[in-house]
Image: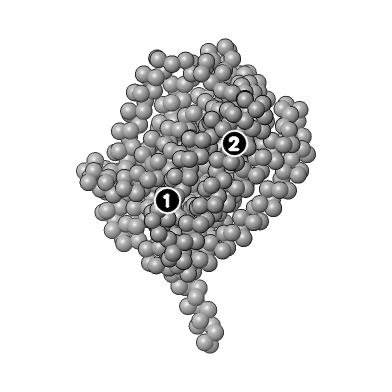
Amino acid sequence: MKTISLLKSRLTSKQDELTLRAHKNVLFSLIFKGVGILVGLVLVPLTLDYLTPVKYGVWLTLSSLLHWITFFDMGLSNGLRNKFAEALAKKDMKLAQVYTSTTYAAVSAVGVVIILIGFILYSLFDLGQALNFTDIAAQETEDLILVVLIFFTIRLIAGLIFALLAADQKVSMIGLVDLLTNVVSLVCIFLLKQFTYDSLFLVGFLFSFVIAFVPLVASFWFFSSTYSKFVPNLKYVNFKHAKDLLKLGGNFFFLQGAVIILFFSNNIIISAILGPEQVTIFNIPYKYIGIITMLSVIILNPFWTAATEAFQKDNFNWLRKTSRNLVIIWFLLSLITLTMVIVSPIVYHFWIGNEVHIPFTITTLVGVYVALLAWINTFGYLLNGIGKIKIQLYAYLFAAIGLFPLAYLLAQKLNFGLEGILVANILCILPAGILVPLQFWLILNKRATGLFTK
């Protein structure tokens, strides 16, 4: 009987409750994200078959550029995620609504400013020429860019619902929304293939519309049901609390900015140095091996908010046990990555046929990059949860600043081409691969001093 009582006690303890909630989210996220990944993979050959490789590269570059818009929420979405989670843990529903309303008001104001600045920049600069687009693609891009800018800005605001879902440890619902986005995009490209051909404008218009529309519908759904108590309301907007959001969110703002510049600038750098066709050659293995990145994020995401709760309650045993388990998972994912690289020629043959030739060296370098990134995130997500992100911030700022000159040196001056840009990416994030795990270990063992405590 003592054994049964002890087992029951362990299973119902707060530590195990955190883990069980995280595992539940991982399971459902794997289902939703897994199907979403498959749909996303099907999208690639369909879109390639509809557009030329050059135009497909142009769309990838343009969408990457516009993903930078998410940088301009000033880190408020991540600040909301942590502060909303803290308010829920304290059962302070009014404070949770204040944080929600204030964040929505602030990000909406930022969205208006983004659109105004976009119109001004559009009238002053020739984007197509700057990114080395062909004349035809540049002409279509000129008609498309403002429309896509508006949709991505709407997505910036609508996407705040993801912060609430993550804070409430319902990250699997984010996977469901992403799945619906991919399914609707697949339907759109299928219809385009039936009735039109090779229109960059239509692809960009419909894909960006879907990116904004699905989260917008999800927001209305959740605010009319699960989060009806937290519907954004002007009377609850209190910019005094924005200080709390920005104090934490400000650091996330710079970290998010560095990460976005680093990870979404590759398409822009490749297009500017080597041309948009090389963007397609990079993105196909990146989408393929990038499945590992998605799986890693699916697994890690629930532990972000769980780490917030564990750290607030000084539950270092949970953090220690969880980190060990996550390292084992990283090792298994790395073995899967190696296998994917080895069999990649066979996969490409059945996936995209002869549309585009992908050198094996490109896939190998992408595999190394993805495995290193997953290693950083293994500890980075736990540090995000406990609000200790300065080391990540400086490491990623260093990487973002150094990426373009190093990529230009290796790709253009030393003539290593696309392989040079990928090597530059690996070298730039390597310091983070050392410093981020070190910071987590120091905090876990209460040996952190100076910058490592922040």
Q: Amino acid at mark 2?
A: Ala
Residue 78: x %, y % from top left: 39, 47
Q: Residues within 10 Å of mark 1 (few under 14, many from 20)?
A: many
- Residue hosting label 2: 424
Residue 106, compared with residue 408, is above or below; it is below
Residue 451 visible? The answer is yes
Secondary structure type for disc 2 = helix
Q: Which label number is shown at residue 196?
A: none
Asked if the residue at tag 1 contacts the one at tag 2, i.e. Cβ–Cβ closer than 8 Å, the answer is no
Residue at 45% x, 73% y is 13
- Residue hosting label 1: 389
Q: Please tell me whether mark 2 or mark 1 is closer to you in this view.
A: 2
Image quarter of residue 307:
bottom left
Residue at 44% x, 45% y is 393
Residue 323, compared with residue 334, is above or below; it is below
Q: How many marks?
A: 2
Left or right of residue 380: residue 424: right
Disc 2/disc 1 C-alpha distance (Å): 24 Å
Secondary structure type for disc 1 = loop
Residue at 56% x, 63% y is 324
Residue 187 visible? The answer is no
Left or right of residue 373: residue 342: right
Residue 75: x %, y % from top left: 38, 42
Residue 440: x %, y % from top left: 48, 58
Residue at 50% x, 66% y is 320
Instruction: Specify the color scheme.
Output: one colour
